[in-house]
Image: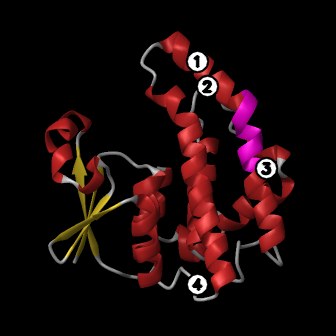
């Protein structure tokens, strides 16, 4: 049994692992840690970070490594080297845009947080979603999936786009994606892709 550990809320770093495993009908257990308990337990985990995977008694860390592992288990990765590169780029893109917005999320002072969010919106939001749309245009033949078939890249892209469209990020217009016609059509295709939307994890994320 694969055991995943993360905080007690939904976030793309853990959600892409859960969605991938569920898609492949791979059983797993989810262990959640409360924020207030994290500092006491942090030293117990590799790299002092979450998510973490417990596999046969060995703990493994880093989202990128865990995501590739789960994707391989569920046939959501790719043996084609170029397709694998595309999937890896989407995963790195998700990490990059998260790093860009993180200061405005972590800032405790409301006024400073607002300024940091405004800085992100002005300097990074459009730039990084342009990068994603441009990659989709170049990589995909029909612009429905990043590679020739549904893969980890699509799970990642759906989850991060949903995060930015959710309305839970202050000052970010949920309709920002309207400026990206190809990416908008791609996202709408995914929210109608039944093999993804039928997963219980999908329902939990959007609820």
How far apart are labels 1 and 3 at the CA level?
Answer: 23 Å
Q: Residue at x 53, y 80 (%)?
A: 76
Residue highlighted by disc 1: 114
User: 179 or 37: nearer the eye?
Assistant: 37
Above or below, comparing residue 47 to residue 169 in the picture: below
Provide residue 185's location: percent of width, then percent of height: 79, 61
Q: Which labelled disc corresponds to residue 117?
A: 2
Residues under labels 4 and 2: Cα distance?
36 Å
Residue at x 67% of width, y 71% of height: 86
Answer with mark 1 or mark 3, whichever residue precedes in sequence. Answer: 1
Mark drawn on residue 78: 4
**Considering depth in this image, is 148 or 185 the residue closer to the camera?**
148
SS at mark 2 in the image:
helix
Disc 4, SS: loop
Q: Which residues are magenta?
A: 122-130
Residue 200, can we see it?
no
Q: Position of residue 2 (x, y in %)?
A: 25, 74
Question: At 83% from the left edge and 69% from the top edge, which residue is drawn?
Answer: 138
Q: Nearer the viewer, mark 4 or mark 1?
A: 4
Residue 7 forms part of the magenta stretch: no
Residue 190 spot, x, y in % from top left: 66, 66
Mark 3 lies on residue: 130
Indicate the quadrant where residue 176 lies: top right
Percent across and percent down for residue 38 are 21, 40
């Amino acid at each position: 049994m694969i055991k995943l550990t993360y905080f007690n809320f939904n976030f793309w770093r853990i959600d892409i692992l859960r969605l991938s495993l569920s898609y492949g009908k791979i059983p797993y257990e989810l262990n959640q840690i409360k924020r207030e308990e994290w500092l006491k337990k942090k030293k117990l985990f590799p790299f002092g970070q979450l998510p973490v995977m417990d596999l046969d008694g060995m703990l493994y860390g880093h989202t990128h490594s865990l995501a590739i592992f789960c994707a391989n288990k569920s046939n959501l990765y790719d043996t084609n080297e170029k397709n694998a590169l595309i999937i890896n780029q989407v995963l790195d893109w998700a990490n990059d845009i998260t790093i860009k917005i993180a200061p405005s999320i972590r800032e405790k002072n409301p006024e400073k947080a607002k300024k940091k969010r405004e800085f992100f919106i002005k300097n990074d939001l459009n730039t990084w979603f342009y990068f994603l749309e441009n990659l989709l245009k170049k990589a995909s033949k029909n612009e429905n999936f990043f590679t020739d078939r549904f893969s980890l890249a699509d799970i990642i892209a759906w989850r991060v786009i949903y995060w930015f469209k959710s309305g839970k990020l202050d000052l970010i217009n949920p309709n920002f994606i309207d400026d990206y016609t190809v990416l908008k059509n791609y996202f709408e295709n995914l929210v109608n892709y039944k093999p993804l939307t039928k997963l219980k994890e999908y329902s939990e994320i959007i609820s």
